[in-house]
């Protein structure tokens, strides 16, 4: 009862009143002009967060649990469903190619089917039959197409912008570069061909910022697990509400203004989010929580991390979380980004230099447009685990950027 009362204050009490009043006041944004927000008191009063059943997928004795189709979480699960029974050697060029191409298909389905403004056919999208057909699209060469599928025979619908950037019309390179306006906060920027990563300053002359999401995992001795990826878009790009001491979120930037799409701006509906924490069970027992900041990259980096744990098995008395976090990672840009200017780079892949020249050369021979970033530039993962047989707890934190910590007591 006390928790419910506190939540009502957020929606209808002094907190809700302060939020609505603040949103109505024009404030400077990255356009260089002042605009009011869209949030009203009625919006706050009419919506309450709910408890939801996770979406799950079973793979090789593991069960991975993710948020629903209003997030990008099922993209992770579909990437597992797209894997063949026999995988290439872990970390080999063939392995990296397979994961990149599978991710392209899953992200294309995200663009066509995911969102809170329409039914998301998750049962079909994660079914063995559907993904067997999708898997057959993966060839020896890199695909440059945006290829959503037709679950249950339904015709996919892409928005005008997605169709345009997929066709190369007015596309913006998501890697950034002068004047691109690329907004993804945690994409490593490198020079095609192998130059060092170019990290943008935190604040530019207009006041625009390159912030970051946070991720937190917790496990206790009883096996309770928490995985959380809190983010409001860029908190520091939205002025603080004076009466409350915190800013509003800016996740509404995820929604499309074109009507009739699963992620269209719709009253009472959430914008599709890139936030995607993860829980994993082994033999039905919860054993691991993990996640990362990184916008559209989150469920690319996380799949590689998870497979590094699942395929390498028990090391050092338990799951080798740190080894999986440290493993060279990558991301691709063959889909419209969730952040302004919603760019797409068909065939574009950014890899950490530690992945090795052999793999880089092999990917390029397959047609991938490879950008080589700094040795430690891809991924922001952290994870915790509990061995259900011994009760041993373990944790790992990302060394990239020296922002993550693993703490036990």
Image (cartoon, rainbow, N blue to C red):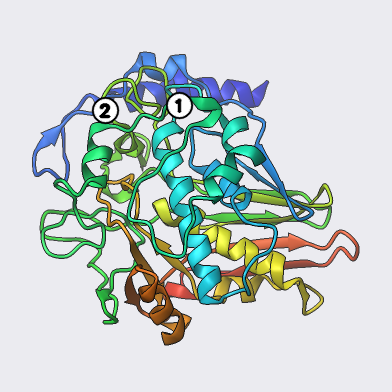
Residues 12 and 300: in front is 300
Label 1: state its secondary structure: loop
Horizontal placement of 189 versus 34: left or right? right
309 relative to 357 in the view: left or right: right
Q: Please tell me in which quadrant of the rendered image residue 268 appears.
A: top left
Q: Residue at x 86, y 59 (%)?
A: 388
| Mark found first going from the N terminus, 2 or 1 | 2
The label number, if any, that marks residue 116 in the structure image: 1
- How many residues crowd mark 2 within 10 Å: few (<14), some (14–19), many (20+)? some
Q: How many marks?
A: 2
- For label 2, the residue is 23
Asked whether 1 or 170 is in front, the reply is 170
Is 254 left, or right, of 71 in this rendering? left
Image quadrant occupied by the N terminus? top right
Query: Looking at the image, can residue 103 be seen?
Result: yes
Crowd around label 1: few <14 · some 14–19 · many ≥20 (10 Å): many
Instruction: Classify residue 195 by image quadrant.
Output: bottom left
Image coords of residue 230 (percent x, y):
48, 46
Q: What element carries label 2?
A: helix
Q: Position of residue 211 (x, y in %)?
A: 32, 57
Compared across the picture, whether 374 is left or right of 407 comes to: left
The answer for how far apart the CA atoms under marks 2 and 1 are is 23 Å
Badge nearest the viewer, 2 or 1: 1
- Of all residues, the one furthest to the right in this rendering is 389
Residue 409 can be seen, yes or no: no
């Amino acid at each position: 009862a006390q928790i419910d009362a506190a939540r009502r204050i957020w929606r209808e009490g002094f907190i809700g009143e302060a939020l609505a009043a603040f949103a109505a006041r024009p404030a400077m944004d990255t356009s260089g002009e002042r605009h009011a927000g869209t949030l009203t008191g009625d919006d706050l009063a009419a919506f309450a967060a709910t408890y939801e059943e996770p979406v799950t997928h079973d793979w090789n004795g593991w069960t991975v649990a993710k948020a629903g189709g209003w997030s990008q979480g099922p993209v992770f699960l579909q990437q597992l469903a797209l894997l063949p029974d026999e995988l290439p050697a872990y970390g080999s060029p063939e392995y990296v190619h397979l994961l990149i191409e599978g991710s392209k298909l899953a992200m294309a389905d995200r663009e066509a089917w995911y969102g809170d403004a329409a039914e998301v056919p998750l049962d079909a999208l994660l079914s063995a039959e559907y993904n067997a057909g999708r898997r057959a699209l993966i060839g020896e060469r890199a695909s440059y197409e945006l290829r959503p599928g037709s679950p249950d025979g339904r015709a996919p619908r892409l928005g005008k912008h997605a169709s345009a950037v997929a066709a190369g019309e007015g596309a913006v390179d998501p890697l950034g570069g002068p004047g691109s306006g690329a907004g993804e906060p945690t994409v490593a920027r490198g020079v095609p061909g192998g130059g060092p990563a170019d990290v943008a300053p935190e604040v530019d002359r207009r006041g625009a910022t390159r912030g970051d999401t946070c991720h937190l995992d917790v496990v206790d001795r009883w096996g309770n697990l928490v995985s959380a990826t809190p983010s409001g878009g860029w908190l520091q790009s939205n002025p603080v509400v004076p009466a409350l001491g915190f800013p509003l979120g800016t996740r509404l930037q995820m929604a499309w203004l074109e009507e009739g799409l699963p992620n269209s701006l719709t009253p009472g509906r959430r914008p599709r989010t890139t936030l995607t924490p993860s829980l994993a069970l082994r033999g039905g027992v919860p054993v691991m929580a993990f996640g990362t900041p990184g916008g559209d990259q989150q469920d690319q980096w996380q799949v590689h991390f998870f497979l590094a744990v699942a395929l390498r098995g028990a090391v050092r008395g338990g799951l080798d979380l740190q080894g999986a976090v440290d493993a060279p990672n990558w991301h691709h840009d063959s889909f419209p980004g969730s952040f302004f200017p919603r760019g797409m780079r068909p065939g574009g892949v950014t890899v950490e230099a530690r992945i090795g020249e052999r793999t880089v050369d092999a990917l390029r021979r397959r047609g991938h447009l490879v950008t080589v970033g700094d040795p430690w530039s891809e991924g922001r993962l952290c994870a915790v685990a509990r061995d259900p047989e011994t009760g041993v707890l373990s944790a790992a934190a990302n060394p990239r950027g020296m922002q993550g910590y693993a703490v036990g007591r």
